[in-house]
Amino acid sequence: MRRAIARFWAETTAQDTIEFTLLLAFVVLSSAALYLHNAKAISAVWGVTSNNLELAKSAVS
């Protein structure tokens, strides 16, 4: 893995590295925006899942 990263770093030009970094930043910021926009829905899904697991646990006991 270390060798692959070193080879990638040696073979890329500065412009390629900047483009890759900007693309990565875009993906990270887009993911954060989607998460913040859907935080309530995600929380609801985890709440329902937790409730179902508790019901299953109590049914087995």
Image: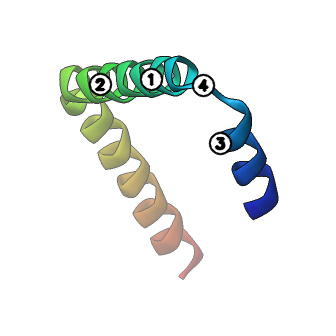
Q: Which residue occupies 52% across, 28% down?
A: 17
Give the residue type at disc 2.
Leu
Count numbered badges in the picture. 4
Residue located beneath label 2 in the image: 29
35 or 61: nearer the viewer: 35
Earlier in the chain: of badge 3 and badge 1, it is 3
Residue located beneath label 1 in the image: 18
**Mark 2 → mark 4, Cα distance in angstroms:** 24 Å
26 or 12: nearer the viewer: 12
**Mark 1 → mark 2, Cα distance in angstroms:** 16 Å
Element at badge 3?
Answer: helix
Residue located beneath label 4 in the image: 13
Element at badge 2?
Answer: helix
Q: Is residue 50 above or below residue 15?
A: below
Q: Is residue 10 left or right of residue 25?
A: right
Judged by depth in the image, the label closer to the viewer, 1 or 2, is 1
